[in-house]
Amino acid sequence: MFEVNEDMVMYAFRYSMGRMTYAVGTVSDYLIDNWHRFKPHTRKQITEEIKEAIDKDRAGMECDINRWKTILLLESATGNTGDKKNGNK
């Protein structure tokens, strides 16, 4: 297995947010498949940016928004591990 370079993940994520290309599917699939490997603060940052993009209507087309919402559901299911009150930084 390889180590996840979270900086590169964030670059790809931010590039794909709001794009109307295959990049959304590629990046969101990667995020979903590797979610458990990211540090809590990275997961928290990604979910916050997804929520903001959706709220500001900058998350792309409906099919793209649905992909981003899948990640929000995944984070909800993991108990938002970036939450300090759960003992995480």
Image (spheres, rainbow, N blue to C red):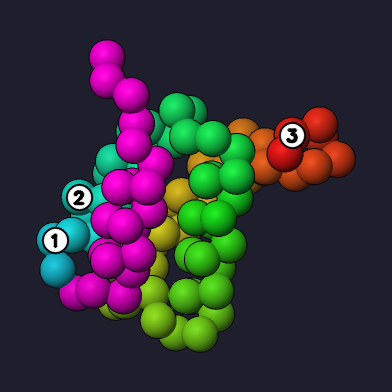
In the image, residue 35 lies in the stretch drawn in magenta: no
Residue highlighted by disc 3: 88
Residue at 13% x, 61% y: name it: 22
Labels 1 & 2 near each other (Cβ < 8 A)? yes
Q: Residue at x 44, y 84 (%)?
A: 57
> Which residue, as the protein is rendered here, is positioned at the far left?
22
Q: CA distance from mark 2 to mark 3?
A: 29 Å
Q: Determine contact: label 3, label 1, CB under 8 Å.
A: no
* Residue to which mark 2 is pinned: 26
- The structure residue drawn at horizontal position 74% and vertical position 34%, both measured from the top left corner, is 88
Q: Which residue is mark 1?
A: 22
* Crowding at mark 1 (Cα within 10 Å: few <14, some 14-19, many 20+): few
Q: CA distance from mark 1 to mark 2?
A: 6 Å
Badge 1 marks a residue whose secondary structure is: loop
Q: Which residues are magenta?
A: 1-20
> Disc 3 marks which amino acid?
Asn
Q: Quadrant of the C terminus?
A: top right
Disc 3 crowd rating (10 Å Cα; few below 14, some 14-19, many 20+) is few
Q: Secondary structure at mark 3?
A: loop
Q: Nearer the viewer, mark 2 or mark 3?
A: 3
Disc 2 residue crowd, few under 14, some 14–19, many 20+, Cα 10 Å: few
Q: CA distance from mark 3 to mark 1?
A: 34 Å
User: In the displayed structure, does residue 49 sit left or right of residue 85?
Assistant: left
Could one spot residue 73 in this view of the protein?
no
